[in-house]
Amino acid sequence: MKKGLMIVGGIFLVIGVLMLFSSFTSLTGFVILENFSFLWQRVLSILIIVVGLIIMSAEEINAAIRSKGTLEERVGYGKNVEIHTIFVRHGEKDKEGQLTYAGIEQAKAYGRSLGERTAIKGYSSRMQRAIDTTENAINAAPHNKRLKTRIRRELGMPGMSKDFLNEYIKHVKEGGENGAADWYFGLGNKRFDKETASAKEVAEGFAYMLRKNIRMSGKLYTGSKVDLVNGTHQLLPESLLKEVMIRDVNGKKVRGFDSVEEIGGVLKYTEPVDFAIKRDGGGETYVQLHFRGQEYDVDMGRLNQLASAYSRRVKGRKQ
């Protein structure tokens, strides 16, 4: 029974992969696929794969939790669960893009600042500075259970052309990092060029990760409290904030911001953006944003729109 979720998740994953392969090769091993169009064959296959991955991710965390706490605390799933999805910018870097000694110490200090919870797991972009930041933070954290860090492409630097980088650097020189960020966010849904991802596309990937963790909260043991530390880069978490954070401005609820200065500027080294996902004793789910010492509501409708847009955009690609 201890490995039940992992087995079930693995079965879903294998079936989904086989179905996806069958849809591309026109095999008739899955009779159910013959009743769907090619597009819906792929959508159904990807959906089954995603369900399998969510179940397996939940089981990985549950496996780390099993040895901790009383039996009463571990009975059931999805009640009084707390998951902190934390997007944290990497530490100080040198000219080669690697963490400096100060950057390593910043990461460790951030890890020590985390409250002790049941387990901690890291995700990171492929950039070594983000990996090193994540792992140094986790190793310094007070948690008893530490899980292996994994790479997530959504956390990495998006596609950028040389022309875009040159233009961005020009804006940094003219208006600093905040001015350059406002220029980028000001492009809105539009791409600078075909090679460069828009800020909205970046937000979609982050929303997809967050929604996945929201769904996973219902599959963790009752009473679980987990930190998921996501090592990433400047401008990327801010892209999600611009789309989903709800601020109180002169008594009115405002979504996002017009200028990053309204929220204190772009992220500093090892500065976190913490989305706290909580499920109460009745299984109701709440998401609250903790950022720079303040709490904000989250526009869940907008978050789901972004996550769904990302799913449609990347369907058929490896998750």
Image (spheres, helix red, strand yellow):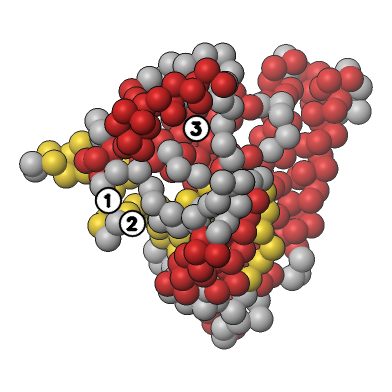
Assign a secondary structure to mark 1. strand
Q: Residue at x 66, y 26 (%)?
A: 315
State the residue lying farthest toward the left.
250
Left or right, 273 with reference to 319 = left
Amino acid under disc 1: Tyr
Q: Are marks 2 and 1 in contact (CB under 8 Å)?
A: yes
Residue 268 rendering spot, x and y as whole percentages: 39, 51
Question: Residue 263's image quarter?
Answer: top left
With respect to residue 59, does 230 lie above or below? above
> 259 or 24: nearer the eye?
259
Residues under labels 2 and 3: Cα distance?
Answer: 20 Å
Disc 3 target residue: 202
As measured in the structure, the alpha-carbon distance from the residue carrying label 2 to the one carrying label 1 is: 6 Å
Q: Horizontally, is 263 left or right of 118 in the view?
A: left
Residue at far bottom of view = 70
On screen, residue 91 above or below 203: below
Q: Residues within 10 Å of mark 3 (few under 14, many from 20)?
A: many
Q: Label 2 crowding class (10 Å Cα cut-off): few <14, some 14-19, many 20+? A: some
User: x and y percent of residue 4 in the render?
Assistant: 75, 63
Residue sitting at x 66%, y 81%: 67
Mark 1, residues whose alpha carbon is within 10 Å: few (<14), some, or many (≥20)? Answer: some
Q: Nearer the viewer, residue 86 or 39?
A: 86
N-terminal of the two: label 3 or label 1? 3
**Residue 15 in view here:** yes
Q: Are marks 3 and 1 in contact (CB under 8 Å)?
A: no
User: At label 2, which amino acid type do we have?
Assistant: His
Indicate the quadrant containing the N terminus: top left, top right, bottom left or bottom right: bottom right
| Residue occupied by mark 2 | 290
Q: Helix, strand, or loop for circle 2?
A: strand
| Residue type at numbered disc 3 | Val
